[in-house]
Image (cartoon, rainbow, N blue to C red):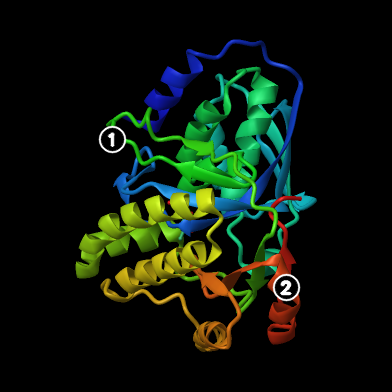
């Protein structure tokens, strides 16, 4: 099945009429159990289910209208870079009628410098805004499937707080959607530690494809991810923070291990990333309940509880603390 065929199936369910404007916000999200590997690259169907937490008010706001001539795409108030505009226009091709163009104004309030993926919140905000403009009247599950086609992790950015993205089994991907866990954990905090502002050489799509195709260690990944997914759900239900932190940190390190064993090898870490990991481990030995996770980049995201915030700030003065619940 192609992306276009899947979109056509979903669009048959649309109920409303097009309006003149759509506007939406979607939060960024950080996976505690990572999506790493695709069972279908065309439809962005993952090998394993994943679980994330959103970053509160940090994310993307998008406004979309019709445009008379070509697509006009703006990022943070300026005409968007070519590659960004091309990816967005190619995605919009899936939905446009002949001769129809769009004006998209998208703004990220995530410090781009923090190296946090904006494609997840970007596609989620775009899909929500498109739903208003084109009057689809889709539910969040349907929207998450459309966001998934833009970028897998975007499926989880439809929700605030904890979200799970079910891998599903169907070849057409109709069972591969994200949903909210609807469980608040008010004392949970995320700390962003920036190591590098530089654009990474290998993007997530290429990184996960190379890993699943060449890494001997990848064989162990789906099993570990499945266990971690269940453990995290249990930890969240019980508000067991050490269990959550340990599982998330181990999941990230296992994912990075599969990459190190890929060929050519893939290492997103910088020397400072390793120094920071060691600082986290030392803090834990000293009795602070502090854990980290990392995506396909050199930056660390710390996980801790509100009561340890002062200790974490003392250890990492540059940390940007995020409360996922506001
Ligand atoms: C390491 O969602 O960016 O952040 O579906 O190819 O666009 P594509 O990949 P993307 O990959 C995210 C990978 C990750 C883990 C995660 O967010 O689950």
Question: Is 274 positioned to the left or the right of 101 in the image?
Answer: left
Q: Quadrant of residue 221?
A: bottom left
Residue at horizontal 66 percent and vertical 48 percent from the top: 27
Residue picked out by circle 1: 169
Q: Which secondary structure, mark 1?
A: loop
Could you say where residue 201 lies in the image, as x and y percent from the top left?
47, 71
Q: Looking at the picture, does residue 201 appear above or below residue 51?
A: below
Assess disc 2: are there few (<14), some (14-19) or many (≥20) residues with their C-alpha within 10 Å of its C-alpha.
some
Name the residue nearer the viewer: 258 or 104. Answer: 258
In the figure, 107 relative to 136: above or below?
Answer: below
- Secondary structure beneath label 2: helix
Left or right of 146? Residue 20 is: right
**Which residue is found at the position 43% from the left and 64% from the top?**
247
Which residue is denoted by mark 2 in the rendering?
309
Is the CB–ligand 1 distance for label 1 below 8 Å?
no
Pinpoint residue 40: horizontal percent, then vertical percent. 30, 42
Q: Is residue 183 visible in this depiction of the protein?
A: yes
């Amino acid at each position: 099945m192609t992306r276009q065929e899947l979109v056509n199936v979903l669009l048959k369910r649309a109920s409303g009429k097009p309006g003149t404007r759509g506007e939406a916000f979607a939060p960024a999200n950080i996976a505690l159990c990572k999506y790493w590997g695709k069972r279908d690259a065309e439809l962005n169907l993952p090998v394993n289910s994943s679980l994330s937490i959103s970053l509160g008010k940090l994310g993307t706001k998008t406004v979309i209208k019709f445009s008379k001539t070509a697509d006009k795409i703006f990022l943070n108030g300026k005409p968007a870079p070519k590659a960004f505009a091309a990816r967005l226009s190619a995605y919009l091709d899936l939905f446009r009628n002949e001769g129809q163009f769009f004006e998209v104004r998208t703004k990220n309030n995530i410090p781009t410098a923090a190296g946090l993926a904006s494609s997840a919140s970007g596609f989620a905000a775009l899909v929500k805004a498109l739903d208003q403009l084109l009057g689809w009247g889709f539910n969040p599950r349907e929207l998450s499937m459309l966001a998934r086609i833009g970028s897998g992790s975007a499926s989880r950015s439809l929700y605030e707080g904890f979200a799970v993205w079910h891998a599903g089994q169907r070849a057409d991907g109709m069972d591969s959607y994200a949903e909210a866990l609807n469980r608040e954990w008010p004392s949970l905090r995320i700390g962003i530690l920036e190591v590098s502002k530089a654009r990474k050489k290998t993007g997530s799509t290429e990184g996960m494809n190379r890993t699943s195709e060449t890494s001997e260690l990848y064989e162990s990944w789906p099993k570990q991810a499945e266990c971690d997914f269940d453990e995290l759900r249990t930890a969240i239900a019980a508000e067991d923070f050490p269990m959550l932190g340990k599982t998330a940190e181990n999941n990230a390190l296992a994912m990075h291990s599969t990459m190190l064993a890929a060929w050519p090898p893939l290492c997103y870490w910088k020397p400072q990333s390793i120094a920071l990991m060691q600082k986290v481990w030392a803090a834990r030995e000293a009795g602070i309940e502090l854990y980290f996770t990392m995506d396909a980049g050199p930056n660390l995201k710390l996980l801790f509880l509100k009561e340890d915030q002062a200790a974490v700030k003392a250890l990492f003065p540059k940390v940007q603390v995020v409360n996922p619940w506001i």
